[in-house]
Image: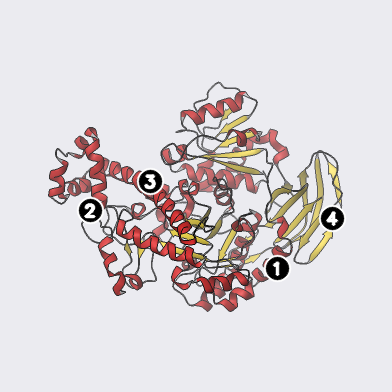
Amino acid sequence: MDWYREVQFIAAVPMPIEWAREYGTTVNGMWDSPTRWDAGRVADAHAEGRRVLASVPLIALTARVYEQDENHYLLNEVCRDIFGNRAEVKWYYWDPKPVYSMCLYSEVFRDYLLGKCRSAASAGVDVLNVDEINTSIGLMSREPGGSGFCPRCLEKFCTHLEDDDDLRARAGVTDVGELRKQDYAALLARLREDDALYREYAACHEEAAFATVREFLDQIRCAAAEEVGGDCQMAVTANLAGLGTFLEIQGRLWGATWGELIDFVMMENVYLIDPGEFHAGHQHKLLPRGKFTSWYRLASSFRSKAPAWLCPQIYVPQQLAGKKSVNYYLLMFLESYANNGRWGYYWWPGVDDQTRLDATVPEAVKDYTRFILDHRRYYEGCGTENGLAVLYANSAILANPKSHFRYIALGQALAESGYQYDVIYSGDDVFTPGAINHEELGRCGAVLLPEADGLTEEQLEALKAYAEGGGRVIAYSKIALDGVPGVTAVTDDPLLEFWREYRDRDRSRILSPLEEFEETRIHTSDPQVNVVRYQKEGQMICHVLNYDYRESDDTIAPKRDVLVRLPWRGEAPAVVRCLSLDGEQELALSEDGGCLTFTVPFVDPYALIVVS
């Protein structure tokens, strides 16, 4: 088993080592500088059972780096805005000095980064985080300070102009060589005024940036292997902020595509109804609405099938400042492990250690850390055999960026109603291959499509073959498979309605085509109590989580005597055990219409059920 598939407890930024020991933290920093680590310190961490993560910024050049004499040359590699000024990274709200946006097209900058990566591999670091993986192109805009218009970026586009007569005509360029002689001034002027050309410029760079990062990741892995003289065990991750949340306003490089390139997904996450209000200080939604379940499922659907590591988006702790919210953070911690994920606590940039600890790390994390370790066999190596799968086809999502929220809404409606589902990820044939895994399809009784408009021909053919073979396809938009038996289209868009308004009637409309799939559903007597089911070695493992969070006073209303109806096939099980912080007890059970029925006496806020 790869170490990152094992249970880990993660501090988002490094805690004082005494606190890390106290809380059982095994990865002390999702954002930790490689300069803090050498072979001796890594060996000490390993001896204590900890793993080491080092983060290498692919965008941000901070003052503490560029003000060092040996790094001053990096200021020459800063990207530029459309007016010729240095581009900046605006989200470093706690840094009093400018944080510049680096250009990954720069070979000088990549060599600097590779040196950091080699140093990390040589020290024996377990995982390298490349942050932000979407590069300075992901920050492209025509606003002052926006990235994407330095000489390297402009030259990259000029190379495309040379090879494309139609694009040259649309850009109003007759002689690319003359454009270069004039320092790209005519192109910059045209880009400032021509919206259509700007969109083509951005699209060209999105594909070029993705190719650059893919090549750079290969270089990192090769350099790391050279450093240790053979097969390098250092994993590579990246912060995939929002994993699609900002597609509509920031472009394709903020999508889910990157998950196919790395060993596991790490991300900051935020639950916003309108991402366009993000920089206006709009408050993200807390629980019970603000579940991250859909993101955990999506992140673990990539090629590695590895657990996802999440923490709150960088502005969330700031938005919650002054509020008591430790029980919110506790539920997010428990939700992550219930969904085979990991939660990065201790995250609030720009404040002192004690403030960060008091505001973001519940004391109960210690108890649940010990509980999970005592029962870690139920949190590692577990699988699913769910009859429902949601197809996240990146081709359709990129063609209709708002459809990412259709996916989130669908996943939330399913989870809140007890439906057990998996996610199948398929690419787009632009960034990553769009072929659908036929084996994954074949295991499902029904495939749900949050968006079907924009699917590739190969994806459509795979779904058609699946439906003609007896599978069910339920599409929440129009689909080019009219008349094929087993295909249902729900075209009145209940998903976006549910996303915006969060009404019971919209949830009911979403679920109405699933009446024949009751065997995939776990019913509870209290709708605020959700269950997530896994299997391992003949046992069924159910994570029972109480989402009745009260934001007004940061409390979770305890639930007593929660009745659970669990679909069951075959012989009756020998025993149902309930494990919680209060200990272990065997539950009385009965059979009722193909379901096992039992009562969980107390959910405050979490219980683990093992059916043997």
Mark 1 vs 2, N-terminal side: 2
Q: Is residue 570 above or below residue 408?
A: above
Residue at mark 4 to residue at mark 3: CA–CA distance: 55 Å
At numbered mark 2, what does the secondary structure look like: helix, strand or loop? helix
Choose the circle earlier in sequence order: 3 or 2. 2
Reading the chain from its start, which is encountered first: label 1 or label 3?
A: 3
Q: 525 left or right of 300?
A: right
Q: Amino acid at mark 1?
A: Arg
Q: Which residue is mark 3?
A: 211
Q: State the separation of the CA atoms marked 1 and 4.
A: 23 Å
Q: Quadrant of residue 365?
A: bottom right
| Residue identifier under label 4 | 587
Which residue is labeled 2 in the image?
151
Residue 209 left/right relative to 305:
left
Instruction: Give me the C-alpha separation between circle 2 and circle 4.
Output: 69 Å
Residue 370 numbered mark, or none: 1
Check disc 2 and give the amino acid type. Answer: Pro
Closer to the camera: disc 4 or disc 3? Answer: 3
The image shows residue 517 at horizontal and vertical percentages of: 69, 36
Q: Position of residue 250 (x, y in %)?
A: 38, 50
Above or below — where is 69 with respect to 224? below
The reply to whether discs 1 and 2 touch (Cβ–Cβ < 8 Å) is no
Q: Earlier in the sequence, mark 2 or mark 4?
A: 2
Contact, CB < 8 Å: mark 3 with mark 2? no
Which residue does the image show at 84% across and 55% down from the upper left?
Answer: 587
